[in-house]
Image: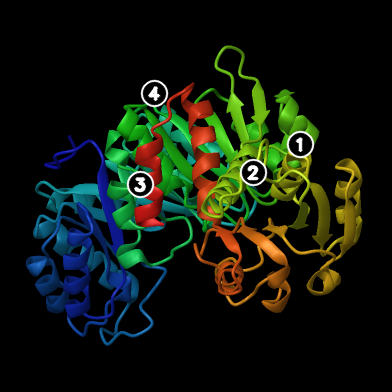
Amino acid sequence: MIMGFKSDMVVYTTLECETQEEMLGCMKLAKEEGADLVELCINSLSFSHISQVENLLRTRTLPSIVCCRPNAPPAVSGNGGDWKTTCLQVLKLALRLDVEFVEVALEVASDAVMAELMSLRLNSKIIVSSHVNGGEPPTAEKLGNLIINLQATGADIVKLVIDVSYITDVAPVFQTLTHCQVPLIARAVGDRGLISQLLGPKYGAFFVCGSLNGKSIPGLPCLSSIKEVYQLENMNADTRVFGVVSNPVGHSKGPLLHNPAFRHTGYNGIYVPLLVDNINEFFRVYSSNDFAGFSVGIPHKEAAVGCCDEVDPLAKSIGAVNTIIRRPSDGKLIGYNTDCEACLTAIEDTLRERQTTNDIASEGSPIAGKLFVLVGAGGAGRAMAFGAKSRGARVVIFNRNYERAKALAIAVSGEAFPFECINEFSPETGMILANSSAIGMQPRIDQTPVCKEALKSYDLVFDAVYTPRNTRLLQEAAEVGAAVVSGVEMFIRQALGQFKLFTDGLAPEDFMRKIVLEQF
């Protein structure tokens, strides 16, 4: 338990407000969103006299860290004088008022300053912090040496804020958390640093930082997600890590589905977004059995094949994997593709429903013999093309990169055409259209790969995009009378396939479907 807090994990958020009223308002909101603690950045506050800061500290409604950085004076300030002196006055005031935590920057934490601060405190804990920015990527050795310097000040708690350029730069942070002999607050800054907060508790972090009111801050989860989606307070050293390897990754709904499913089945796992630039380097760095399984998204599905030690025959024939499992017995990476069956069964079930409604019976796959028009030739497109071919469809591929379309067409004994010709392509009616591209995905929801008039030639239209659920393509297809299949349905089915692989067979289908249909 940490200094009066009920849990071994404390959730906090940083408040940077110009007025006392804003600070108190944000503090109330932070409490509502699940924060146990707030970091009050006095640098952002405009005040003419230190008594105004005293009033803020006396009226605060949450335990606090008082932070006043001497090298970052406020942009708007009426307090005048030397800002470094003012900062020290603020910190001393906080200690006299017995504020829970006071943060001192390493550059001002001299022996004399620390001795004075120590002499003033009652129950307050003193945090000494350092910001690591620019230069070479952080190493465990470099961070370890910095912690020694921080600890030498006599700090109760040490804090590292580290700028990272790649997700692999976060690995030394985890190593440092695991081996640190003093309480450590560690935060990796930037989009690639998000896992420093989401996985920190697994490695011993006791403070987790989140953003307030859903505000997008690179490297921070929003406060509400920490306790609602991820429930990080349940994480321990044995928690197995899963995640979606993609770029971009912010649109992924995977965490909203897999994390509740882990809890529902009693499985000790967490599923996080993994913004990966170089997939080979990612798997080289995160090679422990703790990192147990991965969904693979755009643009890594084909490159991921080369990262695997073994590949399932279907995935090998497709040339793309969307799921990778680390085999516990030997640590080898095994690749699978759950996109193929997810897409094709969703289309088949919808066609069978349509046939039943029209009293048309068919044996085998209702896709057999149909012209299957595919937009996109990436990883998901390859899965759809091979799946359609296996069902006996005639496959035609349109892609902005025509050479890529031709290569896939050859692989499935189909045809390829330039993307610009798709609206004029109408050799027959009753065709199936499948969009595997990102056209129409948020935020470009006004886009569509095929014009409304051309959709009249199709019996069914499928769109792999699931954000938004009802894309412009699907709206216009329904308006002209085609059956439509949302990417949400494919998402549910491929996620079920992945979850079975992640957990060695668990499959709470009704529960997962309910979550998707209610929340997505």
For the residue pair 25 and 341, the one nearer the viewer reads as 341
Which residue has dot 2 on it?
A: 344
> Of circles 3 and 4, which is in front?
3
For the residue pair 478 and 172, the one nearer the viewer reads as 478
Question: Where is residue 417 shown, x and y percent of the image?
Answer: 89, 62
For badge 2, the amino acid type reads Leu
Which residue has dot 1 on it?
A: 390
User: Tag 4: Cα neighbours inside 10 Å, few (<14), some, or many (≥20)?
Assistant: few
Q: What separation in Å lies between label 3 and label 1 (alpha carbons)? A: 31 Å
Which residue has dot 3 on it?
A: 514
> Of circles 2 and 4, which is in front?
2
Q: Earlier in the sequence, mark 2 or mark 4?
A: 4
The answer to whether marks 2 and 3 mark residues whose Cβ atoms lie closer than 8 Å is: no
* Residue depicted at 82% across the width and 56% down the height: 397
Q: Mark 3 falls on what kind of element? A: helix
For badge 4, the amino acid type reads Asp
Q: Earlier in the sequence, mark 3 or mark 1?
A: 1
Above or below, 156 relative to 335: below
For the residue pair 433 and 234, the one nearer the viewer reads as 433
The answer to whether marks 4 and 1 mark residues whose Cβ atoms lie closer than 8 Å is: no
The answer to whether marks 2 and 1 mark residues whose Cβ atoms lie closer than 8 Å is: yes
The answer to whether marks 3 and 4 mark residues whose Cβ atoms lie closer than 8 Å is: no
Query: Left or right of 195: which side holds 348?
Result: right
Query: Left or right of 369: which side holds 464?
Result: left
For the residue pair 252 and 23, the one nearer the viewer reads as 252
For badge 1, the amino acid type reads Ser
For badge 3, the amino acid type reads Lys
Which residue has dot 4 on it?
A: 238
Query: Left or right of 516: which side holds 418?
Result: right
Q: What separation in Å lies between label 3 and label 4 (alpha carbons)? A: 29 Å
Q: Mark 2 falls on what kind of element? A: helix
